[in-house]
Image (cartoon, rainbow, N blue to C red):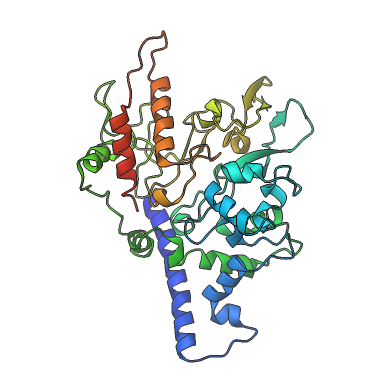
């Protein structure tokens, strides 16, 4: 599977590189622009579609929500933009408090948008049984590294391709009145695979050559201690801490489970899981009662602010379904705040503090007692120090 995916990534990178070469040759030759520029200059045509084209919608472009530096929008970004221009398209439609352009407090505080997610055929809402979709509050996925190096798109993995993702965003978030053509979607995807969408030269090289980036060694004592948490090592005792981050942040992109994960699915390559973000709901988002109709005719209720992957699969209890979300890459993580699907962690320190709580909960014996896995303040600081190296 890894070999096949690597082939896809390399083909995508080759296409982007060739597109850039065509652009460079054309510019050097002084070729004048004309109606076929989208064929002769695919990268520039894709850039225009990504950064300037509104498709007759609410004024948003792809760049409105996917910034050049981070590929996303943080609360700090939102506040800066609001101070400069309260009419910025970011605050329109699902970026507003009510989804109709009124209020900006949610965007300024959490930088989340209102996302309408279709319900699987066997899923309904207890308080609105005829509804076939639900609106949840989610952060904006970063476009750093993802277009070329991660085939799983969106926090719940519901979009199968860059083109499908762009089509959905144009219709839903930008309110486009003109649907993009297949050619325009392809050009957007070509542009999203160019150098500016990578967090580092090493990640760009990986997309081009398949040469996997190595975990940084670490220079300071804190960084070296932090590295131990990200090494692929088996769990040898209940209180072992080495490798606990790698259990779910393994593989070349640090975004999949390894074979040492001490819980189902206990296999390499898992891409979804719950780390109790929806369960703890520290963002304070409103919860709904989701009703899942099981194959035997029974029903399972899941009360949650956002069931995540379960809305796609229709499975209310699976380890990779209920309240589960895509495991994100850690490469470039220092640039892509805030974190988790609901942006409830504003800093890397917040992320690690949440995991300290998560580990304590899941390692507490069923009959009660002290948790087996406790992260000290020093260990949390070491993990943060190391994550900042993952550029």
User: Against 243, is 337 above or below?
Assistant: below
Residue 216 x, y percent position in the rendering = 26, 50
Q: Choose between 115 and 156: the one closer to the eye.
A: 115
Identity of the residue drawn at 40% across and 63% down: 10
Q: Choose between 69 and 331: the one closer to the eye.
A: 69
Residue 199 x, y percent position in the rendering = 40, 58
Does residue 112 appear anywhere in the picture?
no
Q: Choose between 134 and 383: the one closer to the eye.
A: 383
Residue found at the far top of this picture: 367
Identity of the residue drawn at 47% across and 55% down: 70
- Determine whether, in the image, residue 310 is placed left or right of residue 263: right
Q: Choose between 299 and 215: the one closer to the eye.
A: 215
Task: State the image quarter where residue 223 is shown.
Answer: top left
Residue found at the far right of this picture: 130
Quarter of the image where the C terminus is located = bottom left
Task: State the image quarter where residue 134 is shown.
Answer: top right
User: Against 166, is 304 above or below?
Assistant: above
Residue 356 x, y percent position in the rendering = 38, 28
* Tally of marks: 0
Does residue 34 appear anywhere in the picture?
yes
- Determine whether, in the image, residue 368 is placed left or right of residue 315: left
User: Against 195, is 109 above or below?
Assistant: above
Residue 88 x, y percent position in the rendering = 66, 58
- Determine whether, in the image, residue 362 is placed left or right of residue 243: right
Task: State the image quarter where residue 195 is shown.
Answer: bottom left
């Amino acid at each position: 599977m890894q070999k096949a995916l690597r082939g896809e990534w390399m083909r995508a990178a080759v296409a982007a590189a060739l597109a850039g070469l065509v652009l460079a040759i054309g510019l050097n030759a002084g070729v004048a622009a004309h109606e076929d520029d989208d064929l002769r200059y695919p990268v520039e045509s894709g850039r225009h579609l990504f950064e300037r084209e509104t498709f007759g919608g609410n004024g948003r472009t792809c760049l409105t929500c996917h910034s050049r530096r981070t590929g996303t929008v943080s609360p700090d970004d939102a506040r800066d933009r609001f101070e400069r221009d309260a009419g910025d398209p970011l605050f329109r439609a699902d970026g507003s408090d009510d989804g109709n352009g009124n209020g900006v407090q949610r965007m300024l505080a959490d930088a989340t948008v209102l996302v309408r997610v279709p319900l699987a055929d066997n899923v309904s809402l207890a308080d609105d049984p005829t509804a076939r979709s639900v609106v949840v509050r989610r952060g904006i996925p970063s476009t750093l590294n993802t277009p070329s190096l991660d085939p799983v798109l969106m926090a719940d993995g519901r979009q199968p391709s860059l083109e499908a993702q762009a089509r959905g965003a144009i219709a839903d978030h930008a309110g486009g009145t003109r649907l993009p053509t297949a050619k325009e979607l392809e050009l957007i995807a070509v542009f999203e695979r160019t150098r500016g969408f990578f967090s580092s030269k090493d990640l760009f090289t990986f997309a081009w050559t398949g040469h996997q980036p190595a975990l940084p060694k670490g220079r300071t004592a804190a960084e070296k201690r932090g590295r131990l948490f990200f090494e692929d090592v088996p769990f040898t005792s209940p209180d072992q801490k080495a490798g606990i981050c790698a259990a779910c942040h393994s593989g070349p992109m640090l975004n999949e489970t390894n074979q040492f994960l001490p819980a189902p699915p206990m296999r390499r390559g898992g891409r979804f899981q719950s780390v109790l973000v929806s369960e703890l709901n520290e963002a304070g988002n409103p919860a709904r009662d989701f009703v899942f109709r099981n194959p035997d005719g029974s029903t399972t209720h899941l009360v949650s602010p956002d069931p995540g992957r379960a809305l796609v699969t229709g499975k209310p209890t699976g380890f990779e379904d209920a309240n589960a979300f895509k495991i994100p890459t850690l490469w470039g993580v220092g640039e892509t705040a805030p974190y988790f699907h609901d942006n409830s962690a504003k800093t890397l320190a917040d992320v690690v503090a949440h995991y300290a709580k998560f580990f304590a909960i899941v390692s507490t014996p069923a009959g009660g007692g002290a948790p087996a896995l406790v992260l000290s303040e020093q260990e949390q600081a070491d993990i943060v120090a190391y994550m900042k190296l993952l550029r």
